[in-house]
Amino acid sequence: MKGTAYKSTGSWYTVKTDEGDFYECRIKGKFRIQGIKSTNPVAVGDVVEFELEELGDDTVGTISGIDERRNYIIRKSVNLSKQTHIIASNLDVVFLLITLNNPTTYTVFIDRFLVTSEAYDIPTVLLFNKIDTYSDEELKEVKFLASTYRQIGYTCIGISAKTGKNIDQVKALMKGKTSMFAGHSGAGKSTLVNAIEPELDLKTASISSQHSQGQHTTTFAEMFDMEFGARIIDTPGIKGFGIVDMDADEIGDYFPEFFKLKEHCKFNNCLHIDEPMCAVKEALDEDKVSWSRYRSYAQMVTGEEENYRTDIHGKK
Ligand SMILES: Nc1nc2c(ncn2[C@@H]2O[C@H](COP(=O)(O)OP(=O)(O)O)[C@@H](O)[C@H]2O)c(=O)[nH]1
Ligand SMILES: [Mg+2]
Ligand SMILES: [Zn+2]
C-alpha cells in the first residue's frame, strides 16, 4: 500500500492513503535514505510504502520504503552527534510572513531564508502581513521591498491576516498543494491559518501548546488537510529552515539575480567581494541589483552577524 506521512510521534507514523484512510505505521528494520544521517527516517510529507498487519485488535502498518523526496527541510540536532532531523518533505510552496514591526523582519533574515529555500529547491512566496497597521511611510517601505523581491522573481503579496485582505490570493496559491508558513514568532502565522480555515487553527494550537509544555525542544511537524483542497504542514516553533552547510562560493548561486550575472564576471569563481571586473558589483553601482540584497550576501560570505532594515532606501 502507498500513503503520505501526516504525523510522526517517535516510532509511530500516521499515514494517509490516496483513498483517504489513516493508518498507524511503524518502520521495519533500518533503511538509509539518500545518505542522510537522520534521527528520523520518515518525515512528514514522505510518500511511503507499507503493508498492513494485525496487532491485537488493531490493524497497523509496517513501512518498508520511502519514495525519493522532491525536497526536504532539516533541523540540526542540538547535540554534537551532527545528526539532522528532517522536519518535512515534498513541499510545493513555502509562505514567508514578513512584518515591518511587531516583530521586525530584517532583510537579512528574508535573504537568508530565501537562500535556504533556493538551496532546498522550494518555491517561496513572500507575504507582507499586517498591512492594516502601517502608516503611509511604512506602506511605501513595503512596496519598495515587494518590488525589490518581485524583480528577482519572487511572488509578493501584501496581506492582512486580521482583516482578511488578499487572503483569497494566498488560498489560490495554496490550492492543490502542500504548503508551509514560516516567519518570526508574532508575524501572524496562526492568525493567517485562522483566516484561511478557522477549525484548523484549533488543531494546530493544541499541538503547539502540547509541545511548549515539554522539556524537550524536539519539534514534531504535522500535516493537515484543508477544506478547500490544500494541505498545510505545521511546524511549531520553527521560524525558518535548518541551515544548510554551504561553502562561501556557493552562496551566490542562491541569489538568483547574482547567479544570472556571474557568467559576466572576469573570474568564474568570483565571490563578488574584492575581485576586479565583477558584474555583480558593476550592477550594484548602476542600481541594477539591490544594496540590501548585496549586504545580506556579503554578510553571509564573510560570516558577519548583523541585522539591517532601517536603511533599505539608502546605500550605506
Ligand atoms: N493588526 C493586525 N494584527 C495581526 C495581523 N496578523 C496577526 N496579527 C496579530 O499579531 C499577533 C501575533 O499573531 P500570531 O498569529 O499569533 O503570530 P504567530 O506567532 O506567527 O503565529 C496577534 O496578536 C495577532 O492578532 C494582521 O494582519 N493585522
Ligand atoms: Mg503561532
Ligand atoms: Zn563577481
Image (cartoon, rainbow, N blue to C red):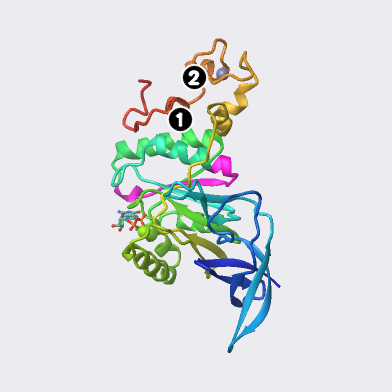
Across and down, in percent, residue 194 comes to 40, 64
Residue 110, numbered circle: none
Q: Magenta stretch: give its range.
A: 117-133
Q: Is residue 215 visible?
A: yes
Query: In the image, is residue 152 above or below residue 26?
Result: above
Secondary structure state at the residue bearing disc 2? helix
Across and down, in percent, residue 102 comes to 28, 47
Query: In the image, is residue 226 above or below residue 188?
Result: below
Circle 1 sits on which residue?
300
Give the mark, 2 or 1, whose residue is nearer the N terminus: 2
Q: Quadrant of the rendered structure where residue 205 is?
A: bottom left
Q: Residue at x 66, y 76 (%)?
A: 19
Residues at marks 2 and 1 touching, judged by CB atoms closer than 8 Å: no
Local crowd size for mark 2, using a 10 Å CA cut-off: few (<14), some (14–19), many (≥20): some
Q: Nearer the viewer, residue 58 or 110?
A: 58
Circle 2 sits on which residue?
284
The residue furthest bottom is: 57
Q: Residue at x 60, y 23 (%)?
A: 261
Find out whether residue 127 is within the magenta segment: yes
- Locate the N terminus by quadrant: bottom right
Q: Nearer the viewer, residue 275 or 311?
A: 275
Across and down, in percent, residue 114 comes to 50, 40
Q: CA distance from mark 2 to mark 1?
A: 17 Å
Q: Is residue 163 visible?
A: no
Q: Residue at x 64, y 73 (%)?
A: 62
Secondary structure state at the residue bearing disc 1? helix
Instruction: Check disc 2 and give the amino acid type.
Output: Leu
